[in-house]
């Protein structure tokens, strides 16, 4: 069970995962050992999945964000397994969601420019059989982006 102290630790880590154990301990009014045990338990239970550095795509020249909507003609297990395997190997795909409604899948793509997007598009449609519709929308402005989950 996640309590108020765990939630505070998680909120702090979502804001800055480079905080020291000492800083975290002080922020939640614990000594280092109990704080470490809580963090270890949250990791062991899979609540904390990992710690990463968030990079600025613009500083890396990756200025085009596309949202690609896909429909497929196939809904069998074999096709799905192959699709997932292929999408996971594509570094341009930052997120892939299976959807309800009009489209079957949504991909979030991050690339350098439209030429790079076109190259990605051609690779995708030529490597995955059975796509009946591939349509994209391009982000003109990112108004909000966060990796922090709401902790109620």
Image: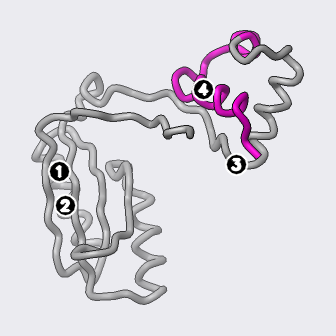
Inter-mark Cα distance, 1 to 4: 34 Å
Decide: is 17 above or below 46. Answer: above
Disc 1 residue crowd, few under 14, some 14–19, many 20+, Cα 10 Å = some
Q: Is residue 91 left or right of residue 120?
A: right
Q: Based on the displayed image, in which of its 4 quarters is residue 27 positioned?
A: top right
Q: Which residues are magenta?
A: 1-26
Point out the tag, 2 or 3, that comes first from the N-terminus.
3
Circle 1 is placed at which residue position?
117
Q: Are marks 1 and 2 in contact (CB under 8 Å)?
A: yes
Inter-mark Cα distance, 4 to 2: 36 Å
Q: Position of residue 80 (x, y in %)?
A: 43, 79
For label 2, the SS is helix
Residue 60 among those drawn in magenta: no
Circle 4 is placed at which residue position?
13
Inter-mark Cα distance, 3 to 1: 34 Å
Inter-mark Cα distance, 1 to 2: 6 Å
Q: Residue 40 or 152: which is nearer the viewer?
A: 152
Point out the frontmost of discs 4 and 2.
4
Circle 2 is placed at which residue position?
121
Point out the frontmost of discs 2 and 3.
3
């Amino acid at each position: 069970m996640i309590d108020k102290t765990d939630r505070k630790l998680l909120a702090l880590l979502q804001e800055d995962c480079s905080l020291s154990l000492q800083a975290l301990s002080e922020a939640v009014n614990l000594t280092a050992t109990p704080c470490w045990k809580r963090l270890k338990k949250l990791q062991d239970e899979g609540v904390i999945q990992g710690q990463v550095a968030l990079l600025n795509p613009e500083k890396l020249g990756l200025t085009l964000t596309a949202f690609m909507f896909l429909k497929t003609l196939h809904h069998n297990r074999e096709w799905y397994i192959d699709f997932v395997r292929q999408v996971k190997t594509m570094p341009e795909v930052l997120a892939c969601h299976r959807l309800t409604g009009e489209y079957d899948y949504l991909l979030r793509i991050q690339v350098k420019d439209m030429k790079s997007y076109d190259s990605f598009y051609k690779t995708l449609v030529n490597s995955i059989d059975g796509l009946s519709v591939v349509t994209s929308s391009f982000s003109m402005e990112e108004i909000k982006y966060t990796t922090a989950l709401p902790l109620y």
